[in-house]
Image: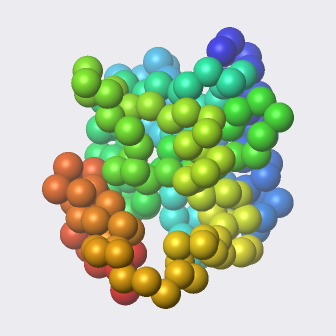
């Protein structure tokens, strides 16, 4: 993806979050302009505060380095925001993931496939609090073992990409 396209997608995300009622800014020094790694977008609405690394693709899987994800998590923790990876594939909407929910490659990088984004990502209305996703699993009545959401949150804490307080908030 070209830098110009990436910049355009980041501005698009900023505008959409602004329209959804968030105070939002694009970090002008994200990328290579500073020694400190900064998220692409900071957004908050008084209740939710996010540090977002935004990535887009024409359809190929999106990869993030382990260093990018670690820097996002570190910044978000110190800033008091929730770290999120925002992905957008051509002709699709934005989808969001907590870093702990991403697939980790053997080399320690992170990957998001288009199918994964569509099936498991948090869509824009849910991300901004306008709707809540309901899945067939959530309305099922069988007890098929441990709750997958609890297992994912516990794995994120174990991997160090989510702190205990954020995990407790998600599990309430």
- The front one of 69 and 18 is 69
The percent position of residue 19, horizontal first and vertical second, equals: 82, 60
The image quarter in which residue 82 lies:
bottom left
The percent position of residue 37, horizontal first and vertical second, equals: 39, 31
- The front one of 93 and 42 is 93
User: From the image, which quarter does the N terminus lie in?
Assistant: top right
The percent position of residue 101, horizontal first and vertical second, equals: 40, 51
Looking at the image, can residue 166 be seen? no
Count of picture labels? 0
In the shown orientation, is residue 139 left or right of residue 83?
right
User: From the image, which quarter does the C terminus lie in?
Assistant: bottom left
* Residue at far top of view: 2
Does 59 appear above or below 98?
A: above
The percent position of residue 31, horizontal first and vertical second, equals: 50, 23
Which residue is at 38% across, 38% downward?
103
Which residue is at 78% across, 64% downward?
20
In the shown orientation, is residue 113 left or right of residue 89?
left
Does 137 appear above or below 163?
A: below
Q: How is the image coloured?
A: rainbow
In the shown orientation, is residue 158 left or right of residue 40?
left
Looking at the image, can residue 131 be seen? yes
The image quarter in which residue 117 lies:
top right
The image quarter in which residue 130 lies:
bottom right
Which residue is at 47% across, 18% downward?
32
- The front one of 144 and 9 is 144
Does 168 appear above or below 23?
A: below
């Amino acid at each position: 993806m070209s830098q110009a396209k990436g910049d355009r997608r980041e501005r698009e995300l900023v505008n959409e979050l602004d329209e959804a009622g968030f105070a939002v800014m694009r970090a002008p020094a994200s990328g290579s302009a500073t020694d400190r790694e900064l998220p692409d977008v900071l957004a908050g609405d008084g209740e939710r505060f996010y540090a977002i690394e935004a990535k887009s693709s024409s359809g190929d899987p999106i990869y993030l380095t382990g260093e990018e994800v670690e820097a996002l998590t570190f910044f978000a923790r110190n800033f008091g925001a929730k770290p999120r990876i925002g992905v957008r594939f051509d002709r699709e909407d934005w989808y969001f993931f907590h870093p702990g929910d991403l697939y980790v490659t053997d080399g320690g990088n992170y990957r998001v496939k288009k199918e994964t984004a569509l099936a498991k990502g948090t869509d824009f209305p849910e991300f901004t609090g306008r709707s809540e996703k309901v899945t067939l699993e959530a309305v099922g009545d069988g007890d098929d073992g441990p709750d997958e959401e609890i297992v994912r949150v516990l794995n994120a804490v174990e991997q160090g990409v989510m702190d205990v307080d954020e995990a407790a908030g998600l599990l309430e």
